[in-house]
Image: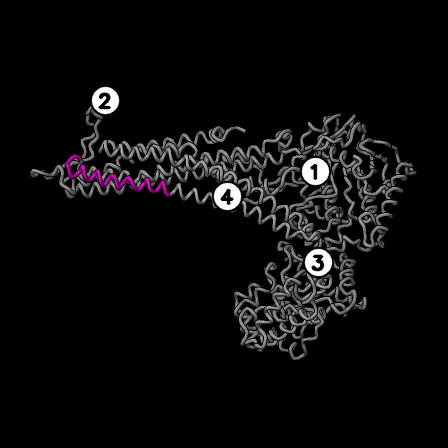
Amino acid sequence: MASLYKYAWKHTKRDQIWMLVVVALSIPALFFSLNLPKLIVNGPIQGQGFERGMSTQTYLGISLPDWLPLGGGLSLFDGFTLDRLMALYVLSGLFLLMVIVNGWFKYYLNTYKGRLGERMLRRMRFEFVDLVLRFPILRFRQLRSPEVASMIKDELEPIGGFIGEAFVTPVYLISQVLTAIVFIFVQSVQLGMVAMAVMVIQIVLIPRMRRRLLVLGRQRQLTARMFAGRVGEIVEGIASVHTNDTSNYERAGVAEELGRIYLIRFDIYQWKFLVKFLNNFLSQVTPFIFYLFGGYFAIRGQLDIGQLVAVIAAYKDLPSPLKDLIDWDQSRLDVTVKYEQVVEQFDVDNIADAALQKPVMERIPALASGFALTSVGAKDDSDGRLFEQVTLDLPLGERVAVVSGIGEGAEHVAEVLGRLRPADVGQIILAGEALDKLPEAVTGRRVAYVDASPYFPRATLRDTLLYSLRHYPVKQGPRGKNAEEAKIRHETKRSGNTLLDVRDDWIDYEALGLASPEELGHRLAEILKLVILDRDVHLFGLRTRVPAEFQEEVAATVLQSRHAFRDLLAAEDMEAYVEPFDSDRYIANASIMENIVFGAPVDQRLGLSQFYVHPFARDTLRATGLSSDLFEIGRNIAATMIELFGELEPGNPLLQRISVMTPEELGDYRQVLSRAAGRTYEQAGDAERAALVRLALSYIEPSHRLGIIDDAFRQRVVETRRIFREKIPEELAGMLVFHDADAFNPAASIQDNILFGRIAYDLANATAAVEGLLLRTFDELGLSDIVQAAGLYYDVGAGAKRLSVGQQQKLALARALMKAPDYLIVNRGLSALDADSQSRIIEATLAYGKRAEAPFGTFWVLASAQHAELFDRAIEFKAGRVVADAPIEGKVPAFVEEVEEIEEAEAGQASNGSAGPQAGKTRPEMAGSPTEDEAEVPGETPLPPPPEAGSAATVR
């Protein structure tokens, strides 16, 4: 990239020239404002010019300078004739006006510079992200994502701000300094020499001292970037930290890096304030000289008082621009270094041509033919050969299975076909053109790639599935006011950003063979069922609220389903499995807090905890006498947990049996009990009362089974519920929706709305039985579309960490199939699943690829050779070469059977080597039953669910 100044001038030339014009216009106003104090002091105040009975004086006349060869002394304007008092008023008013004018110039220039700087910051961030999007894939294996994010987010910020003032600031500051110096020389040559000498010392000495600050600043930047990378690695590898007991090692590493940063930053502070001290000293010593020698000259009659006042006033404004000029120069050096460092990190060889990622509005026609590889080979980063001499013909209509051991080359061939790894020798042709010359609009829309370790950004399931369809906006989305939209587009264009709008509808339904957006739900349901993810999505939906946009249209259906499902429970003799909500009865399978509130919070992120902290809730509990009971219940729970688990070492498996609090909270509650020992609720401190009451509010008798509540307590809870509901203040009522047997509750989950109750904890397998019945009867109840829509709004979390690995792999395959590709590449994409699930998904995917309306070819690197029989052709890789290639015509080739025997032998050795389940071991599943990864369904809300009773003692 170009140097910082070339880059800035290229993109801001017009703006910089305009600001220079404004600076030139500001100089006369500044000089005039410096001369006014002398006129005021000498004229109206001291009476100069009003002696000898003269009652008026002429001011503000304009004439050409005497030194001009032609027209010197020519009067352009005779000025105003004013008496002494009027002159005072007019000149003082002009001084105030000049203050406003000069302030306006500064305001205008600073605002203009700020806007220009923000535009350039926006431009640079966009351009650097654009570069990241065009990095060669292998480059990302050498990068730490937090460092890249830190460079784009933080390190570019001062650079963007500096560009706004790169040209105009030094010109403006120099003009102010020179104007003041010239004015001082005009008044007194001696004082002008003093001001010039001090200024030269500042200009020479201060920048030299600040060079050390530049070195330290570079060191601080590099160490901060390394620290950001280390923190990012800790977050990404937190599982390894916990499983290897290396948390203290990581703490030590963090402490060491923070110590290095501390020393650098402290050194910076020392130098910075030393430089500041010297700069301030030199700035303040000059007025001392002016007062001393200027006063001397005034006493001797060599300088009048007005001139001395004007000189001092002029110098008063000199240190600020001079200091700012020195600061600007340091900033220039610092920003130049930062710019060079950032550019160096983004100066990458083999970066993709921007034309390959050019937006393409037109639909891409189907591929005319498949892949053809001729003597293709590839190397790794260390020049080690990954595979070589691979020659293959992969027609579009053929389903190809690839069998090989890990690291034999098959995975890397799949990466090359998916353009995730470059081939260094040979030729790859797709649809008659070289693969590396095809734009991503072709390969990204007509070819799908799935691997074993997909990454998903934080989004809903729906957005994740539809991500592969967002190529170019096809329909304008919602917009704001026309004036606002015009301003947004203007700034976007001036900042060099793309004018494509993320708010538009980017999905081309017709290209998918869909007549309308409404049909998309059926396609999603079809794909989810194909990859055996439909059950998981339905479970997500059951435990999630109905999305707001669907609530009105589904409320009646949910109410009908509530009554119909109650009849189904009776028909299946399962009525006891669900305890219905009853406003006049204590709900045993709900927490005490849920029993008191008897409703669901509008803000699901806060849960019911927001109600206990409200003064009304605390006053109600105190008025009914429930506060003392809850305090004692909380004391009993804490004492019991500490007695049972308090002496166990951290990491003991028995600690996982604690359900009413977390193992980490045992120590906290030990201290709470110690402080509350021998005290009643009224005598205990606020912290102890809050902790123990919150703990009690989360208690569920059938789940925790401590036997510490009786019928009398239950009756007081029901009475408190009645008072709470009758007297709840308006602001609190707006945060809650009460349960009503005849109304849909938009704040409750779909499952709670249908069951209108809680599954019984004390009945074995009640949860599985009730949820299983719900899943089996969705269509009958008319809930399938509703639950799926709600489930698709489930938040998968950062990196899809709220999903199991098996669910992530299924989701990746579903996303690939959603875009209806012409060719599907799967690189061990289902390796986390058991053999039976892999077989079912592979068979369904291949059948889906045979459809007449949207057939596709397949290159599938199998995790297990036993599935090769489902394909049309099998290829074997060994040592980076194709060693076998044969069609599968009713009989599996011998080489596939050999690979399968080797895999079975390795699996047997792994099984004998450990008592626990191994990655290579598979197990068949019962037909229709969920696999292990399907059963791993995270929490019920798009954000981690809060404690039910509003405390950290979450019921698990």
Mark 2: few/some/many CA within 10 Å (<14, 14-19, 20+): few
Tell me which numbered mark, 3 or 4, is placed earlier along the sequence: 4
Q: Which residue is mark 2?
A: 68
In the image, the segment drawn in magenta is 277-302
**Which residue is situated farthest in the bottom direction here?**
712
User: How far apart in space, not on screen, are marks 3 and 2 (Cα)?
Assistant: 91 Å
In this view, the residue in front, 459 or 653, is 653
Tell me which numbered mark, 2 or 1, is placed earlier along the sequence: 2
Residue 568 image position (x, y, % from top left): 78, 65
Residues at badges 1 and 4 in contact (C-beta under 8 Å)? no
Colouring rule applied to residues: one colour
Q: Give above or below for 70 relative to 342.
A: above
In the image, what residue type sits under mark 3? Leu
Helix or strand or loop: what does disc 1 sit on?
helix
Label disc, if present, on residue 747 of the rendered structure: none
Q: Which residue is mark 4?
A: 264
Q: Give above or below for 454 relative to 429.
A: below
Q: Please tell me whether mark 3 or mark 4 is closer to you in this view.
A: 4
User: How far apart in space, not on screen, are marks 4 and 2 (Cα)?
Assistant: 58 Å
Q: Is residue 165 left or right of residue 588?
A: left
Residue 823 image position (x, y, % from top left): 76, 35
Q: Which residue is mark 3?
A: 542
User: How far apart in space, not on screen, are marks 1 and 4 (Cα)?
Assistant: 58 Å
User: How far apart in space, not on screen, are marks 2 and 1 (Cα)?
Assistant: 78 Å
Tell me which numbered mark, 4 or 2, is placed earlier along the sequence: 2
Q: Please tell me whether mark 2 or mark 1 is closer to you in this view.
A: 2
Residue 945 image position (x, y, % from top left): 64, 59
Q: Which residue is mark 1?
A: 511
Q: Please tell me whether mark 1 or mark 4 is closer to you in this view.
A: 4
Q: Quadrant of residue 113?
A: top left
